[in-house]
């Protein structure tokens, strides 16, 4: 089940990668409803989900099925509490144990030998970022050069900015995210502006022009993203 670009973090330290993977799995478990971790809308897995819910009831005292659901049944018939999340009272170890029982993992460790190619690494912490759903197959590609990888990601970011400004790439930018560096960049040029998240359809960097029409537009935009701590990607050479 490939939900996002698997190359979310790069390190030569395997233990460090495993630690980051574990932190990402926990964030994913706390961020999405329980039923979201199953492909039940496309694959029949009623018995698997019923067995898992029975485990949750017996071991942790909660359920993501309707009250009084009969766990001896073989079919769910839609009796799922859609949107119900794991209780916030669960510890990280509880969630790890639950995930092991569920057997659903959303990140993978890839051990890659040097091959002289480049990959695009997305910021792993903003796991709901729309950039992950945009041509994700190309985000998993090995590029022959850094230039080739950068060309693709620039086209993607530019298209998203022209469509919905900065929102599709980095999500909502809050007023408290704005730094002195951000203000300096905004004041240095007139074309890219910031609309506060307190305004309707705000929390974005925006422009009345397309990014390609702005002098050094891509570079300016990436500096703005970096200044608010939302650098969406990096390019890594596998050497």
Image (cartoon, grey):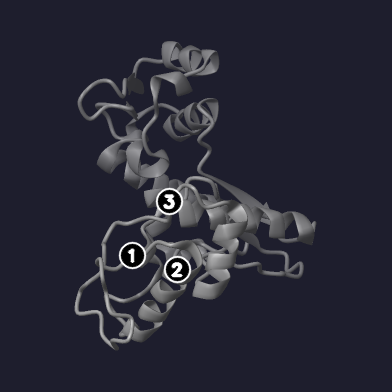
Q: Which quadrant holds residue 36?
A: bottom left
Dot 1, crowdedness within 10 Å: few (<14), some or many (≥20)? many
Q: Is residue 234 above or below residue 174?
A: below
Which callout, 2 or 1, points at the residue further toward the start of the chain?
2
Q: CA distance from mark 3 to mark 2?
A: 18 Å
Q: Residue at x 26, y 71 (%)?
A: 68
Which label lies toward us, 3 or 2?
Answer: 2
- Labelled pair 3, 2 in contact (Cβ < 8 Å): no
Locate residue 182, reporting x and y percent. Answer: 49, 19
> Mark on residue 129?
none
Q: Is residue 155 left or right of residue 122?
A: left
Q: Which quadrant holds residue 170?
A: top left
Q: Is residue 28 above or below residue 162?
A: below
> Mark on residue 56?
2
Q: Which residue is mark 1?
A: 64
Q: Residue at x 66, y 69 (%)?
A: 110
Element type at marker 3? helix
Q: Is residue 211 left or right of residue 127?
A: left
Element type at marker 2? helix
> Mark on residue 31?
3
- Front in this rendered view, residue 136 or 187: 136
Q: Does residue 194 show up? A: yes
- Labelled pair 1, 3 in contact (Cβ < 8 Å): no
Q: CA distance from mark 1 to mark 3?
A: 15 Å
């Amino acid at each position: 089940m490939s939900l996002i670009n698997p190359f979310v973090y790069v390190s030569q330290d395997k233990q460090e990668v495993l630690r980051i993977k574990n932190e990402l799995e926990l964030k994913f478990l706390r961020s999405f409803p329980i039923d979201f971790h199953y492909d039940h809308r496309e694959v029949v897995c009623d018995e698997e989900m019923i067995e898992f819910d029975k485990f949750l009831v017996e071991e942790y005292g909660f359920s993501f099925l309707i009250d009084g659901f009969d766990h001896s049944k073989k079919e769910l018939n839609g009796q799922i509490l859609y949107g119900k999340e794991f209780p916030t009272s669960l510890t990280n170890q509880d969630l790890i144990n639950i995930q092991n029982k569920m057997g659903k993992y959303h990140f993978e460790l890839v051990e890659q030998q040097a091959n002289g190619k480049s990959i695009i690494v997305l910021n792993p912490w903003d796991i709901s970022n729309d950039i992950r759903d945009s041509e994700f197959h190309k985000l998993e590609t090995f590029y022959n050069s850094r230039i080739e990888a950068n060309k693709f990601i620039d086209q993607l970011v530019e298209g998203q900015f022209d469509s919905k400004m900065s929102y599709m790439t980095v999500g909502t930018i809050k007023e408290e995210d704005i730094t002195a560096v951000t203000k300096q960049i905004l004041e240095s040029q007139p074309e890219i502006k910031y609309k506060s998240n307190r305004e309707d359809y705000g929390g974005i960097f925006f422009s009345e022009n397309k990014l390609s029409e702005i002098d050094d537009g891509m570079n300016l935009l990436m500096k703005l993203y970096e200044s608010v701590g939302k650098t969406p990607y990096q390019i890594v050479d596998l050497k």
